[in-house]
Amino acid sequence: MFDKGGRIMGSQNTKSQKYEHIVHPFPPLYDDDSEILILGSLPSVKSREQMFFYGHPQNRFWKVMSRVLGEELPTTIDEKKIMLHAHHIALWDTIYSCDIIGSSDSSIKNVIPTDLGKIISSSKVTKVICNGKTSGKYFSKYQQKELDIEPVILPSTSPANAAFSVDKLVEIWGTVIPDSCKSLETFQKTGGKSPI
């Protein structure tokens, strides 16, 4: 079952679940050469368990990105890091802490946003992509004015976003990811090794 925000819910209805105060449990993924920053809202329960982004197997983020970038589908966290570093893509979320029921975006309240300034100042990021409307909502509310960057809000890769197939997501996301990030030369220069 999925909530309106496209997050995977537990077997219980959110009405019978309790709010938890969640602090983002793992760091952003970026390096000096990152050119674009892709933002989610807050890691799902499954992602928090795995301590990495888009950890639920039904989320289509990694399928979409691997096809857009012309890479094989990464299966381990290390492989995912290698792929994104090689193509100058950074990952983070808009929310640092909040109160939430399970993984339900629609239940989010008492938000403290992430500090994106360090990523921007420590990298070559000039473009921000929000993975879905919830991410876009919080970026626009808390971070856009400070960073002076207009976000590109793309359809969510959540399986709840059933109106968009993987093929359609690849088509849309592929038009927004810069060609410089798709170059296979960037991956070859790393020798398939992660810089962290």
Image (cartoon, helix red, strand yellow):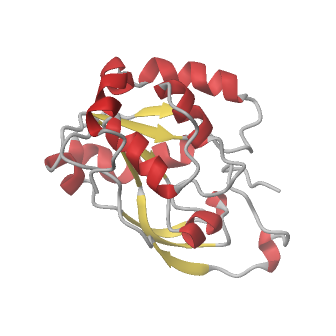
Relative placement, left or right, of 39 versus 158 is: left
Q: Is residue 89 visible?
A: no
Q: Is residue 107 left or right of residue 179?
A: right
Query: Hey, which quadrant is residue 7 in on the image?
Result: bottom right
Q: Which quadrant of the structure image shows residue 11?
A: bottom right
Residue at the image point whose x is 70% and y is 82% from the top: 18
Percent across and percent down for residue 31 are 24, 49
Please give left or right for residue 126 compared with residue 11 in the image.
Answer: left
Where does the image place residue 118, in percent across and percent down from the top left? 19, 56
Left or right? Give the position of 59 relative to 82: right
Residue plotted at (51% across, 76% down):
22
Q: Is residue 147 above or below residue 24?
A: above
Horizontal and vertical percent position of residue 146: 22, 48
Of residues 193 and 94, the one nearer the viewer is 193
Residue 56 appears in the rendering:
yes
Q: Could you tell me which residue is drawn at 62 percent across and 40 percent down?
A: 157
Q: Residue at x 78, y 68 (%)?
A: 10
Q: Quadrant of the N terminus?
A: bottom right
Q: Is 20 situated above or below 34?
A: below
Residue projecting furthest to the front: 191
Seen from the viewer's position, the closer of residues 109 and 96 is 96
Quarter holding the C terminus is bottom left
